[in-house]
Amino acid sequence: MTIDSIGAKAAVKSAELRVAGYDWRTLADELGGYGCAVMEKLLTPQECRQIAELYSDESHFRSHVHMARHGFGKGEYRYFRYPLPDLIGGLRTALYPRLAAVANDWNERMGIAQRYPDEHAAFLRQCHEQGQTRPTPLLLQYVSGDFNCLHQDLYGDLAFPLQVAILLSEPGKDFTGGEFVLTEQRPRMQSRAEVVPLRQGDAVAFAVHNRPVQGTRGNYRVNLRHGVSRLRSGMRHTVGIIFHDAK
């Protein structure tokens, strides 16, 4: 066993322990009711700083995107390359089974045939069989005036319906503004906005595309998008954990 594999296994075990410490029944209810749920203090301040510091080292990343060039907003982000940093890879592996249970329940309620396997490695094999082989976890950086337009992170035909964002910076100290925003469009109704308050190390799990809502005639689908409001001052780093790979 190599040193790298030892580190990766330890990171997965650590991630499993911290993920298991949350009340997942309550989190599943919040995801079902609002399309998002907060996991407080998923990362320590030191871990947040260590991940944010990776941004300046291009060796960790496969691509660098400036949002303004593509009409995505203003700011920038970098997609990690494989192998992912141990902690991020460990969290991706540990969070997936908890969210897959929610995703399978949602698909059943919405009449969608797709079911997700229990383990993330099995789901990634499905992605790779469809030509989606590029890793999608990313590190985002915003400075004063930056923002992220409302969007959906799909990347291919096979998309896992939930993802996680972890705030690495401390609001009020490192930056002001820059709130995480989720919008929901229900049929024949005006859009509903959800502004999610986060502290350093907090994670928000949220719907990528659709979620079911119970109506008078059964379940129906609502469409969701997420973004980040304008940063008023400072610098904000966030790590995004997306569970499907990209084409």
Image (tube, rainbow, N blue to C red):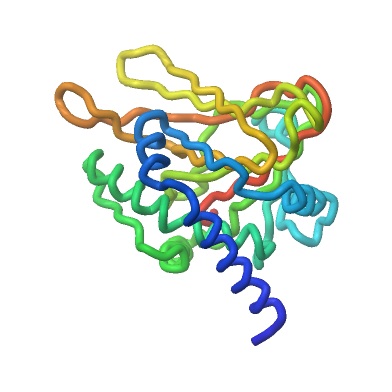
Q: Quadrant of the C terminus?
A: bottom right
State left or right for residue 118 relative to residue 199: left
Name the image quarter holding residue 196: top right
Residue 247 shows in the view: no
Residue 198 shows in the view: yes
Which of these two is toward me, 85 or 43? 43
- In x, y percent, where is residue 78? 72, 48
Residue drawn at (70%, 77%) of the image? 4
Q: Is residue 204 above or below residue 217?
A: below
Residue drawn at (74%, 34%) of the image? 170
- In x, y percent, where is residue 208? 46, 39
- In x, y percent, where is residue 192? 44, 18
Q: Quadrant of the N terminus?
A: bottom right
Residue drawn at (82%, 51%) of the image? 53
Residue at far bottom of view? 1
Q: Is residue 187 above or below residue 117?
A: above
- In x, y percent, where is residue 226? 54, 30
Name the image quarter holding residue 179: top right
How many marks the image carries: the answer is 0
Residue drawn at (65%, 60%) of the image? 87
State left or right for residue 96 relative to residue 9: left
